[in-house]
Image (cartoon, rainbow, N blue to C red):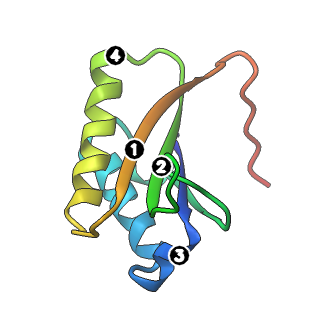
Amino acid sequence: MPHCIVEYSKALESRIMPETLLQAVYQGAVESGLFTPSAIKSRAIACDYYMVGDQVADFVHINLRILAGRTDAQKKQLTDAVLAKLSDLSISPLSITAEVQDMHVESYAKRLL
């Protein structure tokens, strides 16, 4: 845990590799101090069609899915750490957003095969 789902504008790939975005998000999650590094799962999804307001503009949005039970302060600590690492990449202009979503503990399942 967590699942870090990075959605980004496809056109952004002309300026930065998706792997670089994933590495920044991973580092932010590690530096939040809330998770064991080996438990962090990250994936990137390129969006071919998008708008920011009424403009076609580059964006990165990170959905951080974690098991319920963290405090609001811990969630803020996580989003702040992830946004800081993405900001360090100095990609401009760019809209960067992040949110934490709680996963239902009782229905979450994991199986390693």
Which residue shows up at 73% across the image and 39% down it?
110
Q: Which of the two labelled residues, at mark 2 and mark 1, occupies the earlier sequence position?
A: 2
Nearer to the camera, 89 or 95: 95
Q: Secondary structure at mark 3?
A: helix
For label 3, the residue is 11
Q: Are marks 2 and 1 in contact (CB under 8 Å)?
A: yes
Q: Which of the two labelled residues, at mark 1 and mark 3, occupies the earlier sequence position?
A: 3
Which residue shows up at 31% across the image and 57% down it?
27
Distance from Cα at disc 1 to Cα at disc 3: 17 Å
For label 1, the residue is 97
Using a 10 Å C-alpha cutoff, classify the residue at mark 2 as few (fewer than 14 neighbours), some (14 to 19) or many (20 or more): some
Q: Quadrant of the C terminus?
A: bottom right
Q: Secondary structure at mark 1?
A: strand
Three-letter amino acid code of the residue under disc 1: Thr
Three-letter amino acid code of the residue under disc 2: His
Q: Which of the two labelled residues, at mark 4 and mark 1, occupies the earlier sequence position?
A: 4
Question: Closer to the observer: label 1 or label 3?
Answer: 3
Residue 70 left/right relative to 113: left
Q: Are marks 2 and 3 in contact (CB under 8 Å)?
A: no
Q: Tell me the tag on residue 72.
A: 4
For label 2, the residue is 61
Q: Mark yes or no: residue 49 visible.
A: yes
Q: Is residue 49 above or below residue 20?
A: above
- Where is residue 48 shown, x and y percent of the image? 67, 68
Q: Which of the two labelled residues, at mark 4 and mark 2, occupies the earlier sequence position?
A: 2
Distance from Cα at disc 4 to Cα at disc 1: 17 Å
Q: Which of the two labelled residues, at mark 4 and mark 3, occupies the earlier sequence position?
A: 3
Nearer to the camera, 87 or 22: 87
